Image (tube, rainbow, N blue to C red):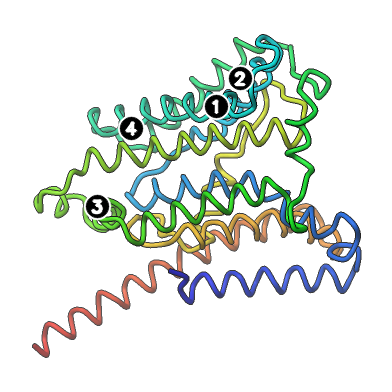
Amino acid sequence: MIRSRELSIALVLVLVVALATFQTPNFLFSSGGWRDLLLTPSILMMLAAGQAVVIITRNVDLSVGSVLGLTAYLTGRLFIDVPGIPIVAVAAAGVAVGVVLGLVNGLLVTFGRVPALVITLGTLYVYRGMVLTWAGSDRVNAGDLPRPFLQLGVRSVLGVPVLFWLALAVLVAVGYFLHTARSGREMYAIGSDPDAAELYGLPVRRRVLSAFMLSGGLAGLAGVMYAARYGTVSSGAGQGLELEVVAAVVIGGVAIFGGSGTVWGAAVGAVLLVTINRALPILGIPDFWQQAVVGVLIIAAIVLDRVLAARRARRLTETEEKA
């Protein structure tokens, strides 16, 4: 559920939006201001939901940007090469490819017993190489995609963009799973202490594998969203997005060492990160300081995690001594 940490991040987000709106009222109150505020971070929110689950298990997935690029280009090619193919079938293909790529990451991490940082750094380049080899200098243009599909990227329902509704639905499903399902709670236990979880008999490999498959599947769906949002897809789609996703998740309160955090926090972190990038130029802050602000937020989040962890450990020790 939402904790004080997530509420703090949400308050910072509200403050950033208020300052930018005070400086330039069109930031929020123009015809496209509200829509852009929700639409722009939708893809990052989708990626952050999957990344949060992986990090909760004390791992990380650096390949999500390349998976997004691969499935975004796949989306365009399917519409070009298979005329009349249903949008649902294309979305399912994107998710399926993402799940397979996530499965590869999970198998290498769980059975190879190699740190996820190393494995997914390698698959980041492998998957990107696949996109570069397949697409080359070619690219998918908006004219190659069916109009109903492109409308998904701009259409709103009840004043809220369709892509934001989609990201919100995924967040609700993943958040509910982590909070209520036994397998979801086991992921927290695995992230808190993998060795103890294994000794207790939890299916560590299966849970970590499913976390990577979920992250890959959501990255695949994010690739479909990317194609609908931007219309034009080249081999560079999603490049560098992996670091932005990890930053959003950490800023949102998911502990980088695993075991705590929520997808809600990760989603708010994603919205905050995107909104800061839009708001700081309006506030007249130079490019250098825009990057520095993001860096400070990441460092502050990690320091806060360590301070809170140390405080919890001290309280636990004091409780045991009193008992």
Q: Where is the N terminus found, in terms of image quarters?
A: bottom left
- Give the amino acid type for the residue marked by disc 4 in the picture: Gly
Q: Where is the C terminus found, in terms of image quarters?
A: bottom left
Q: Position of residue 100 (x, y in %)?
A: 41, 25
Packing grade of label 4 (10 A; few <14, some 14-19, many >=20) is many
**Location of mark 3 (residue):** 190
- Give the amino acid type for the residue marked by disc 3 in the picture: Ile
Task: State if disc 1 and disc 4 touch (CB < 8 Å).
Answer: no
The quarter of the displayed image where residue 226 is located: top right
Q: Is residue 323 above or below residue 295?
A: below
Q: CA distance from mark 4 to mark 3?
A: 15 Å
Q: Is residue 286 left or right of residue 71?
A: right
Q: Please tell me which of labels 3 and 1 falls first in the chain.
A: 1
Q: CA distance from mark 4 to mark 1?
A: 18 Å
**Location of mark 4 (residue):** 106
- Give the amino acid type for the residue marked by disc 2 in the picture: Leu
Q: Residue at x 45, y 31 (%)?
A: 121
